[in-house]
């Protein structure tokens, strides 16, 4: 499959999250079933900065992980037949390296390690100023596909 990009409007066809919980602004490059890359521009107007933390605003780690998971979702929802399908997290292991601050561009790179029977195993990294801010191994699923492979009761 060829690589392509998704602007903020096109992205909504492949990512079910919406504002204020959509943690991606643009998908720069996606190769369905292989990888997805893009970014979130962080302005001081983000809903979480005033409360995390007053006087020292930074992007919560849970939202950094969410951004990685959302980008990995795009890598599988762009596969034929998966457009618009809901995904759920199964597990993740994440490491945080540095704070992500207002005014920064949070660049996201994800890779699909395997995609089988509705389960995606993947890896993602978030960068600011060319340095790794966080990285995670993730397992996500499209429940609609997975349930077809589960034993019948």
Image (cartoon, rainbow, N blue to C red):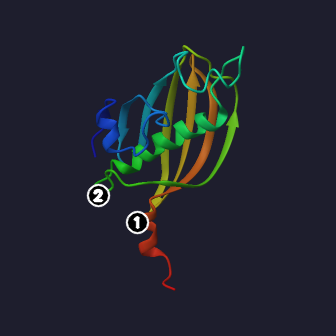
Nearest the viewer among 25 and 30 is: 25
Residue pictured at 28% horizontal, 46% vertical: 1
Q: Secondary structure at mark 1?
A: helix
Establish if 55 lies above or below 30: above
For mark 1, what is the residue?
145
Estimate the spatial distance between the alpha carbons at disc 1 and disc 2, rounded to whole Å: 10 Å
Q: Quadrant of residue 6?
A: top left
For mark 2, what is the residue?
81
Residue 52 in the image, given as x and y percentages of width and height: 68, 25
Q: Secondary structure at mark 2?
A: loop
| Left-right relation of 21 to 27 | right
Residue 11 in the image, given as x and y percentages of width and height: 34, 37
Residue 46 in the image, given as x and y percentages of width and height: 54, 22
Quick one: label 1, few (<14), some, or many (20+) residues within 10 Å? some
Residue pictured at 70% horizontal, 37% vertical: 95
Q: Is residue 6 visible?
A: yes
């Amino acid at each position: 499959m060829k690589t392509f990009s998704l602007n903020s409007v096109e992205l909504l066809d492949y990512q079910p999250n919406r504002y204020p919980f959509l943690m991606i602004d643009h998908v720069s490059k996606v190769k369905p079933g292989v990888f997805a890359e893009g970014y979130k521009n962080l302005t001081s107007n983000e809903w979480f900065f005033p409360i995390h933390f007053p006087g020292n605003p930074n992007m919560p780690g849970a939202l950094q992980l969410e951004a990685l998971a959302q980008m990995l979702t795009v890598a599988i929802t762009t596969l034929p037949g998966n457009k618009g399908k809901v995904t759920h997290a199964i597990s993740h292991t994440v490491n945080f390296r540095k704070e992500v601050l207002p005014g920064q561009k949070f660049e996201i790179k994800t890779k699909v390690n395997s995609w089988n029977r509705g389960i995606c195993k993947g890896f993602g990294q978030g960068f600011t100023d060319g340095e790794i801010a966080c990285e995670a191994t993730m397992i996500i699923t499209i429940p609609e596909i997975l349930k077809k492979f589960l034993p019948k009761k």
